[in-house]
Image (cartoon, grey):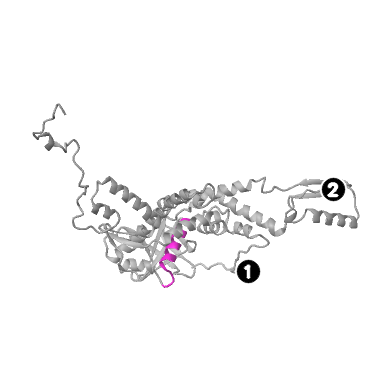
């Protein structure tokens, strides 16, 4: 048995990271790296610092958070069920709106959303708790799949191991905690471990937006920047130098003096520009490019974000496009994930049951649906029950017949056939 080598001068030292003498933006850069949304923490930092990111994400997430969930079983709508009651009040700490909002924002920002169902894992859960993705670390197994999920922080911390139930991989920490993960496409590891933030492709534009805003705020806070050097070629004593310096600062310094014309006389004075201003960087266009890039990533119509060429008509169409292209696809991802996790635990058949939302609660969708119903009624090729099914309404007896106006006749039929068979003869002298 060999002895372990011991060095008395070796001690376990505590290592701490701290950022000294830097701005907030530089500190974030040093801690988070390039800020290109490659990690959940970096993605969340971009969301916190840029309105170009937060505005479209909040628009989609807020619209989703107020959707009222319902079950559809064999095309029959069920609004009163214990699963729906759980979603309406997932935990003592989260309302339905707050729970949906957190899931939506985590997914939109980081490309992942994670929640834990509390209670016996083979029974209906008693509580649902969302987790912040930045507190989750995933360990890869030798097969390239998830070996374990480590949750840190103060909420439901632990190690969750994978198991396959009902053809779906789930993660358990003991018999009372089930963790579920929804992730989107990622360019790494065949999308088997983590999701990829949609902001990754627009990171350059977003960082331009953040750094440009930080730069301008810094100028305003400090009253200017070193953009010009005033150099006097002639030698001056200390008193003359201080007088000249004070005169230059008074005339050119401060934000209120920006744009003024300076006039000097006498002396050998040279002025050299050493800075690049916002005009040279075309800052305004860079800001617009950042906004457009992020809104395109999240399928948010530009008329809802900017007032350029905004009219009431394209604003109304933009609201419909927001639901069609962003909110409804997001709802399918989230409700689909919730359904895969929860429906089997309520002894419902996943093949016949799905979680969806009530479209009658969305005014924009109701208005468009009513317009479509009027058109379909005018065409008059469907029964009342077929139209009611499209509106999630119950059928009624006698509603399976296509109704036509009583005055309609078959094409080519002579309505005056009886007159043609009468004994009436035209009077040639008439």
Q: Position of residue 267 (x, y in %)?
A: 89, 47
Q: Foreground: 264 or 430?
A: 430
Does residue 139 appear in this view? no
- Position of residue 338 relative to residue 377, above or below, is below
The quadrant of the image that shows the C terminus is top left
Q: CA distance from mark 1 to mark 2?
A: 68 Å
Which residue is under mark 2?
Answer: 264
Which is the main secondary structure of the residues drawn in magenta?
helix
Callout 2: 10 Å neighbours few (<14), some, many (20+)?
A: few
Q: Foreground: 246 or 359?
A: 359
The span shown in magenta is 92-108
Residue drawn at x 16%, y 36% is 414
Q: Is residue 145 magenta?
A: no
On residue 9, the disc is: 1
Front of the two marks 1 and 2: 2
Under tag 1, what secondary structure?
A: loop
Mark count: 2
Callout 1: 10 Å neighbours few (<14), some, many (20+)?
A: few
Q: Position of residue 290 (x, y in %)?
A: 56, 49
Q: Is residue 107 magenta?
A: yes
Left or right relative to 337: residue 107: right
Left or right relative to 259: residue 3: left
Under tag 2, what secondary structure?
A: loop
Name the residue at the bottom extreme.
92
Q: Earlier in the sequence, mark 1 or mark 2?
A: 1
Location of residue 162 by image quarter: bottom left
Residue drawn at x 37%, y 52% is 368
């Amino acid at each position: 048995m060999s002895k372990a080598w011991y060095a008395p001068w070796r001690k376990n030292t505590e290592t701490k990271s701290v950022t000294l003498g830097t701005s907030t933006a530089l500190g974030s850069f040093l801690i988070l790296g390039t800020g290109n949304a490659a990690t959940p923490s970096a993605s969340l930092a971009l969301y916190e610092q840029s309105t170009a990111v937060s505005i479209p994400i909040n628009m989609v997430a807020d619209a989703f958070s107020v959707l009222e969930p319902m079950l559809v079983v064999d095309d029959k709508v069920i609004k009163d069920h214990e699963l729906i009651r759980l979603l309406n009040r997932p935990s003592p700490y989260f309302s339905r709106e707050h729970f949906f909002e957190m899931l939506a924002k985590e997914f939109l920002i980081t490309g992942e959303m994670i929640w834990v169902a509390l209670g016996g894992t083979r029974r209906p859960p008693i509580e649902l708790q969302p987790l912040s993705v930045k507190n989750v670390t995933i360990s890869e197994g030798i097969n390239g799949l998830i070996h374990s999920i480590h949750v840190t922080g103060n909420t439901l911390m632990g190690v969750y191991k994978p198991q396959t139930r009902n053809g779906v991989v789930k993660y358990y920490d003991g018999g009372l905690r089930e963790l579920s993960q929804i992730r989107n496409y990622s360019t790494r590891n065949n999308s088997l471990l983590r999701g990829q933030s949609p902001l990754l492709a627009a990171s350059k534009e977003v960082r331009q937006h953040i750094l440009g805003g930080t730069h301008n705020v810094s100028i305003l806070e400090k009253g200017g920047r070193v953009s010009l050097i005033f150099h006097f070629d002639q030698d001056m004593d200390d008193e003359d130098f201080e007088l000249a310096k004070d005169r230059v600062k008074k005339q050119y310094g401060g934000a209120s003096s920006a744009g003024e014309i300076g006039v000097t006389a006498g002396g050998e004075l040279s002025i050299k520009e050493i800075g690049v201003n916002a005009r040279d960087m075309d800052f305004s266009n860079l800001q617009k490019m950042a906004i457009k890039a992020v809104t395109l990533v999240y399928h948010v119509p530009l008329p809802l974000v900017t007032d350029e060429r905004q009219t009431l008509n394209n604003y109304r169409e933009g609201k419909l496009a927001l639901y069609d292209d962003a909110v409804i696809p997001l709802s399918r991802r989230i409700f689909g994930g919730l359904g895969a996790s929860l429906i089997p635990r309520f002894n419902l058949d996943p093949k016949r049951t799905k979680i969806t939302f009530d479209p009658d609660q969305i005014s924009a969708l109701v208005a468009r649906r009513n317009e479509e119903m009027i058109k379909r009624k005018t065409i008059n090729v469907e029964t009342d029950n077929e139209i009611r099914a499209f509106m999630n309404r119950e059928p009624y007896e006698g509603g399976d017949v296509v109704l036509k106006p009583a005055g309609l006749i078959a094409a080519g039929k002579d309505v005056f056939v009886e007159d043609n068979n009468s004994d009436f003869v035209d009077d040639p002298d008439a």
